[in-house]
């Protein structure tokens, strides 16, 4: 029997690639998107629910699937207001996890970030850490939290400082061995494929994955 998947953040860098992979995967019969803006020219097995994700609970009756892929995230540049930032990076994933629990969805995958720590003095890391704790508190049967390092890929918008950082990291990457492997740049292709591989091979687990582990799973688990 074919599965139904929910994607939050399908217009973003990783979410858009994940969407295409699920469309091409014969094991998925239906894909549900929850977002603020519509994506054009999608196949008939993709259903879009357009609205304010800050009130995601309004979609509870439509939030029915086998798996939830949460690729939601913003940046300080896009969202300088810290209150709004937290509503997005903490509020949306946590609400999604609560809806998944209430609607008996047993597989929940969410993209966090390297350095996530609820006790951090850095607002970004603290927000991600608090999000992770709140998601895990739902005790969804198969919960996977992915902590990618710097993400490579072709973004729609130009980010000068991030592009400079990526260029520098690509030069020094050969020096990252052993425990430093988790700091290597990871491509969106690897993140999206790892999420699908985890969902397909999930057993009862609550797992936090570092960037090097994500890359390995994208290549080795089928």
Image (cartoon, rainbow, N blue to C red):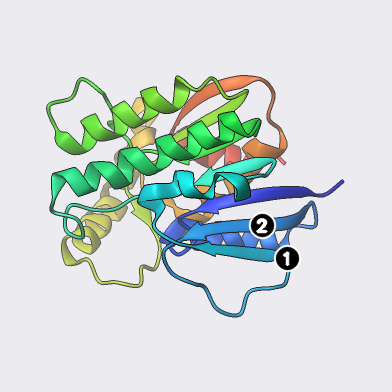
Determine the CA span between mark 1 and mark 2. Answer: 6 Å
Q: Is residue 115 left or right of residue 18?
A: left
Residue at 50% across, 47% down: 191
Instruction: Give the residue at mark 2.
Output: 31
Q: Is residue 72 visible?
A: no
Q: Given contact means CB atoms under 8 Å apart, are the residues at marks 1 and 2 in contact?
A: yes
Q: Nearer the viewer, residue 2 or 104?
A: 104
Task: Give the vertical position of 129 relative to 169 (above or below).
Answer: above
Decide which of tag 1 and tag 2 comes sooner along the chain: 2
Q: Measured from the top left, where is residue 92 in percent x and y? A: 39, 43
Q: Is residue 131 visible?
A: yes
Q: Nearer the viewer, residue 111 or 49?
A: 49
Q: Secondary structure at mark 2?
A: strand
Q: Nearer the viewer, residue 141 or 146?
A: 141
**Badge number at residue 45:** 1
| Crowd class of label 2 (few under 14; some 14 to 19; many from 20; radius 10 Å) | many
Q: Measured from the top left, where is residue 43 in percent x and y? A: 69, 73
Q: In the displayed image of the protein, which residue is found farthest to the right?
A: 1
Q: Measured from the top left, where is residue 132 in percent x and y? A: 38, 28
Q: Is residue 69 left or right of residue 13?
A: right
Q: Measured from the top left, where is residue 45 in percent x and y? A: 73, 65
Residue at 50% across, 23% down: 138
Q: Secondary structure at mark 1?
A: loop
């Amino acid at each position: 029997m074919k599965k139904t998947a929910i994607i939050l953040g399908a217009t973003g860098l990783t979410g858009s690639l994940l969407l295409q992979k699920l469309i091409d995967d014969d094991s998925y019969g239906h894909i549900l998107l929850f977002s603020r803006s519509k994506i054009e020219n999608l196949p008939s097995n993709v259903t879009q629910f357009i609205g304010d994700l800050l009130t995601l609970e309004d979609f509870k009756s439509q939030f029915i699937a086998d798996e939830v892929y949460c690729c939601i995230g913003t940046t300080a540049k896009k969202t300088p207001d810290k209150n709004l930032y937290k509503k997005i990076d903490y509020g949306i994933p946590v609400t999604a996890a609560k809806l998944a629990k209430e609607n008996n969805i047993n597989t929940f995958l969410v993209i966090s970030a390297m350095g996530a720590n609820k006790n951090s003095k850095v607002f970004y890391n603290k927000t991600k850490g608090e999000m992770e704790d709140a998601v895990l508190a739902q005790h969804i049967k198969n919960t996977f939290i992915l902590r990618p390092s710097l993400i490579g890929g072709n973004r729609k918008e130009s980010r000068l400082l991030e592009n400079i950082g990526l260029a520098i990291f690509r030069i020094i990457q050969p020096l990252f061995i052993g425990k430093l492997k988790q700091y290597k740049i990871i491509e969106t292709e690897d993140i999206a494929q790892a999420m699908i591989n985890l969902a397909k091979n999930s057993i009862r687990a609550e797992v936090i994955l570092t960037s090097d582990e994500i890359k390995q799973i994208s290549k080795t688990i089928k």
